[in-house]
Amino acid sequence: MSARVVRTVADLRTQVSSWREEGLKTAYVPTMGSLHEGHLSLVRLGLEKADRAALSIFVNPTQFAPHEDFDAYPRAEAADVRAAASAGAELIFAPNASEMYAEGFATSFEMKGPAEGLETDFRPHFFGGVALVVAKLLIQAGTDYAIFGEKDYQQLCVVKRLVKDLDIPTEIVGGPIVRDEEGLALSSRNAYLSPEELAVARTLNKTLFTAAADIAAEPARAEVRLGEGRAEIIRNGFNSLDYLELRQAGTLAPFTPGMKEGRLLVAATIGRTRLIDNVAVEVG
Ligand code: PAF
């Protein structure tokens, strides 16, 4: 199967509207490209819900700080288009920066609620940029569904809040994390890892899963167990740990006694690669 690539909002809207006029529903997978199996699983999930799948490829400058990897971020459009088509996407929106941010662009977003803490403590610009571009992408496309990976769990919670707050009529669906054979969550940034770093990276999910199981079994020890997990991550060879934190699933409010549905989230750096991961914690 091949996919049609469009570069303007007008062409994107025309295609999605024509599917709607035929009575077909569309699922949309916003991405920054450099597609891997995790993204493709989101396309397939979209096609379980809808008749057509569209995917966007746009490395969004507003979610990168000046010192981050915007210029180095892997870009491989031709391969991405082939991969997306092989998963069943029929439409690819790949705009240039001026289509998304025309000269004189003057709008910015500030997110609170699920955007507070975690990533925001280390990347304060991040969710403003994500919220802005996701709002634009969803409003531009007007699809029935949009699919986001649970790997970026805080982002998924932020997007759900954003869509509710702005009354955007697109249903947000979370797709499960896809992992490699040793449990490492797939990420475009894994391409930066050397073989030695990859071995360290693959310990992260083990620390996360073990800590989550222990906390679920003995929630009263959660703080102590988190401390042990933090020490283990550094012992395993990570250069730095930004956070290993337990939050309430969905709202991402601090997890307090009596809460049942938790989410354990981690961000740690090995070499020049910052990895994030998370897992559900079901208490009692
Ligand atoms: O998760 C991503 O790839 C990006 O943050 C997103 C949602 C496509 C917005 O640029």
Image: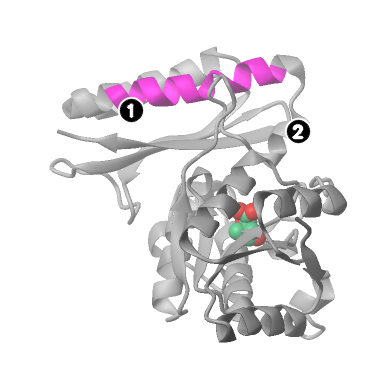
Distance in Å between CA atoms under marks 2 and 1: 27 Å
- Find out whether residue 209 is within the magenta segment: yes
In the image, residue 281 lies at what x, y percent? Answer: 29, 35
Amino acid type for the residue under numbered disc 2: Ala
Question: In screen coordinates, is 1 left or right of 199?
Answer: right
The reply to whether callout 2 and callout 1 are in contact (CB within 8 Å) is no
Say whether disc 2 or disc 1 marks the residue closer to the N-terminus: 2
Quarter of the image where one finds residue 282 = top left
Q: Nearest the camera: 230 or 174?
A: 174
Amino acid type for the residue under numbered disc 1: Ala
Which residue is pictured at 55% across the width and 37% down the height?
276
Please, is residue 17 above or below residue 279 in the view? below
Please, is residue 220 above or below residue 114 in the view? above
Question: In screen coordinates, is 77 left or right of 143?
Answer: right
Total numbered badges shown on the rendered structure: 2
Per the rendered image, the range of residues in magenta is 197-213
Report the magenta stretch's main SS.
Answer: helix
Q: Quadrant of ligand 1?
A: bottom right
Question: What residue did someone put label 2 on?
Answer: 191
Which residue is pictured at 30% across the width and 24% down the height?
213
Q: Nearest the camera: 235 or 204?
A: 204
Q: Secondary structure under badge 2? A: helix
Question: What residue did someone put label 1 on?
Answer: 212
In the image, residue 274 lies at what x, y percent? Answer: 64, 36
In the image, residue 41 lies at what x, y percent? Answer: 57, 46
* Label 1 CB sits under 8 Å from any ligand 1 atom: no
Which residue is pictured at 40% across the width and 58% down the height?
114
Which residue is pictured at 56% across the width and 51% down the height?
44
Q: Quadrant of the C terminus?
A: top left
